[in-house]
Structures are given as structure tokens and as C-alpha cells.
Image (spheres, helix red, strand yellow):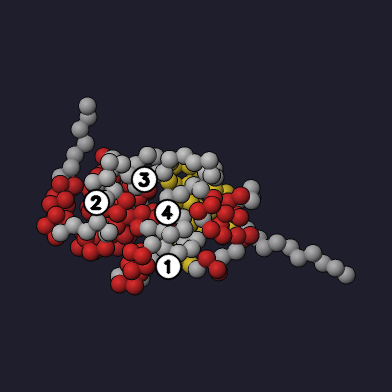
Amino acid sequence: MNRTKSPPARTLEVITTHLNADFDALASMVAAKKLYPRALLVFPGSQEGNLRDFFVRSSFYFLDITRAKHVSPEEIKRLILVDTRQASRIGKFEEAARSGEVDIHIYDHHPDSPEDVHGSVEVVKPLGSTTAIMTQILAERGLPPTPQEATVMALGLFEDTGSFTFSSTTPEDFEAGAYLLRHGADLNVVSQMVTRELTVEQVALLNDLIDNASRLSG
């Protein structure tokens, strides 16, 4: 008698990002893990050189990353996308995103694109980094990061804003930086890792500026 094999049950929550993930992508994944503590952190493919170097050189072994090859798209019940909405940029998880059977939650700072997927939760804001969006959410929900998490998130914030020099940088990015510093972000690590490296003196000055930043109502 022929028996049709049943598809695997959809039981997994997966947090992922775009191919060639950078620090903003990693930072946003770390923040998303605070919102979805049962979800797996999974890169869809390769990471940028600095990010690979970070894993080799750093002591942040608290990041529990699951290999993509160990996750079947057919088992995913919720897909949390950070720093991207484009199905073509999430590798093997495109299948899950387009299946119509998966609950999709999106957190992104990029402009709209014809390739964008949509979800039951979409938090999209034109800030300088997705990290700033995630930091806002953690602050609002009373989910402060640990110093290690805050350091990784600061890496994403500094890299995607060009250490707060890119024209896309917003006041919310600066406010996110202040929040992360208050929660123990290590700027020595940040200054060593970001692509646009600052001198120790510049980082110290920037630390003072951010720490003393205040919102002006106008």
C-alpha cells in the first residue's frame, strides 16, 4: 500500500536577515531574540568580512547561531525578518516567505521595494539603522540588553550610520546610541571593529556627546 509522507509540522520560529549580513543585521537579530526568546538565530548565507572576523576574534560566544542547513523551510511557522524585506535576499528562507503558510514579522529601515514581502507585523521606519528601530522597541517594552548584547547592537548602529556621519542618520539613531551606552555597550570593542574606525580620542568624545544628548521640542 502506498503511503503519502506527511509534511513536517511547522513548529519553528526563525530570526534571519539578508545574505552577506553586516553588523546592523547581526545586531538586529540579537535584539529580535529579546522579543522572540524561543526563536532560532539563523544566517541565510555568508556574512560580510568584518562580521566573520568578529566571530573569530571576539569573546561573544553567547550568540547561539543555528546553521541554515539544519533548518528546513517546511518546519517554519514564524519567520522574523530583520534589516530586509526582500525575498530574493534571504536565501533558502524565500521558500517559507512565499509559501503563504508562515507568519511573517518584519523589522527594517530600507525604502520600499517591488520585491518586498509582507507580514502580520511590519515595523518599518526610515532611520539610519535597523538597530535603532530594535533599540526603540526594547526600551518601550522594558527589555534592556545585557552589556554584551548592547555592545553587539552598538556595532550595528555605528557601522550603518558611519559612526553617526552618514546623511541618513537620524536623532533616533543618536538616542539609540545613548540607550546602549547606558546599558553597558563597550566602545573599545566598537572602535576596534567598525569599518570606519575612529581613534580612541574620537570615540571618547563621541561617547560624551551621545551620553549628554537631549531631545529638544520645537
Q: Residue 152 carries which label?
A: none
Expressed as whole percent of the image width and height from the top left, the position of residue 191 reads: 21, 60
Q: Specify few, some or many for label 3: CA neighbours under 10 Å numbering under 14, 14-19, or 20 or more.
A: many
Asked whether the residues under the numbered discs 2 and 4 touch, taking CB atoms below 8 Å apart as contact, a structural biologist would say no
Query: Callout 2: helix, strand or loop?
Result: loop
C-alpha distance separating marks 3 and 2: 17 Å
* Position in image of residue 217 (x %, y %): 22, 29
Badge 2 is on which residue?
A: 163
Q: Does label 2 or label 1 sit earlier along the sequence?
A: 1
217 with respect to 35 (left or right): left
Disc 1: which residue: 64
Residue identifier under label 4:
32
| Residue positioned 40% across, 44% down in the render | 109
Q: Nearer the viewer, mark 2 or mark 1?
A: 2
Task: Compare residues 88 and 97 and report the one nearer the observer.
Answer: 88
Residue 110 in view, yes or no: yes
